[in-house]
Amino acid sequence: MPASLPLFPTAVVGSFPRPEWLLRAIKEFEHGRMTEVELSQHYDDAVKLTLKEQETAGVDIVSDGEQRRFSFLAFVSEKLPSFKIVPVKNLMNKEAMKLAEEMNLPINVISQPVITDTVERSVPLALDEFEFAKQYTEKPIKVPLIGPYTLLINSWNRRLSSSAYQGPYDAVDDIARTLREEILALKKRGAFFVQLDEPGIGNFVDYRYTRFLLALNEWKIRAVDELHKLAVEMINKVLKGISGMKLGVHICRGNWPAKEKYLSRGGYERMITDMLEIKAEQLVLEYATKRAGTVDVFREHRIEHEIGLGVIDVKSKRVEKPSEIVARVEEVLKYLDASQIYLNPDCGFASGRPWPVVDRETAFTKLRAQTQAASALRKEYR
Ligand SMILES: [Zn+2]
């Protein structure tokens, strides 16, 4: 365990834009002009650079920037043979197409893991990434891991997964066990913070993307809101009884290269009572983007969780002023204790390799503004 954290600890959510030379190396590898060993050295270097940049920006809880992953979701199929990576365009049907068009989804660039065999942790999912990163930093490390509900709703497809699991609910236990085993392995090796990424829950703000996934994967459910219970039950099944490390759940509204008007919009009002049932110490939430709701939910409910408060918009190139970050935190301090608040960007800076919105330099500058805001707050509220 690291030395104790300061008040208003600063963190990242996970991903960081990949260096240009890494993107070029990946292309070289894909064209057969680079060996896997050479490429893995590039990945190693990119992780070292990312850790260093986060440290220089003053981040208290760092990550490896997800440099090795294609995306926060698809990396599951890069690791586990129970899943196959499938381009979303190959799964499309008439109803999914209609919904995709309404949201202007970039279906030609998205791929997702699909269950094709019994789900089990035949190899580590993130442990290897963590083992590497911890050699190069003394800072506490956050390991982002896909959340069980988001994984299930993306990966159980009636056409391709029925031979492994007749219905989506039949895969729940195996998915939960797989992620739980990963977290326990990370705990054993000293990971400070594991964060389950659940944009699937964030999508409850307006249900549009949820309806798209239900159509795409041909799920038959009575009402969309039955998914709220499923999501919370799955998370709690994964986390039950695990102590001695920080566990968080990141609930965001999606993060890809679409025009703002097509992205989901709204506050957490619709699912806050379910969110508060989540047995994790920290909820990592979006509050910086203009599409986010207000902090009214904090006034209307008793919040016992720590809140990883999104104070940096990862989809805007404009760098936040420390003073505006301080003001955002102070609004929340009306309802929460200072010791409950962590500062982080709304989401990863590049949750998918091909679609970072801001470049590395901007991401760095934004993280530095976040640190400056935390320093100002610490002076005020020690
Ligand atoms: Zn996110």
Image: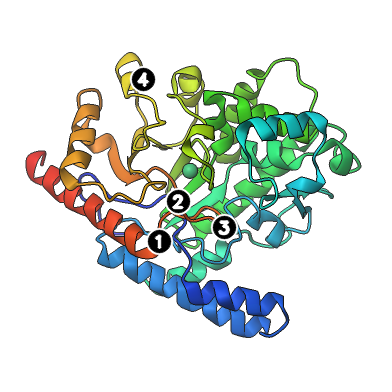
Separation of disc 1 and disc 2 at Cα? Answer: 12 Å
Residue at (47%, 73%) from the top-left corner?
46
Q: Residues within 10 Å of mark 1 (few under 14, many from 20)?
A: some
Residue identifier under label 3: 185
Separation of disc 4 and disc 1 at Cα? Answer: 33 Å
Q: Residues within 10 Å of mark 2 (few under 14, many from 20)?
A: many
Between marks 4 and 1 in the image, the one whose residue lies nearer the viewer? 1
Q: Residues within 10 Å of mark 4 (few under 14, many from 20)?
A: some
Separation of disc 2 and disc 4 at Cα? Answer: 23 Å
- Asked whether the residues under the numbered discs 2 and 4 touch, taking CB atoms below 8 Å apart as contact, a structural biologist would say no
Residue identifier under label 2: 348
In the rendered structure, the answer to whether residue 196 lies left or right of residue 342 reads right
User: Which comes before the other along the chain, label 4 or label 3?
Assistant: 3
**Which three-letter amino acid code belongs to the residue tagged 1?**
Asp
Q: Is residue 338 visible?
A: yes
| Image quarter in which the C terminus is found | top left
In the rendered structure, the answer to whether residue 277 lies left or right of residue 304 reads right
**Which three-letter amino acid code belongs to the residue tagged 2?**
Gly
Provide residue 104's location: percent of width, then percent of height: 62, 37
Judge: label 2 CB < 8 Å from ligand 1. Answer: yes
Separation of disc 3 and disc 1 at Cα? Answer: 33 Å
Q: Residues within 10 Å of mark 3 (few under 14, many from 20)?
A: some
Label 4 sits on a secondary structure element that is helix
Residue identifier under label 1: 359
Provide residue 340's location: percent of width, then percent of height: 28, 35
User: Which comes before the other along the chain, label 2 or label 4?
Assistant: 4
In the image, 302 versus 331, the foreground residue is 331
Classify 336 as above or below 135: above
Residue identifier under label 4: 297
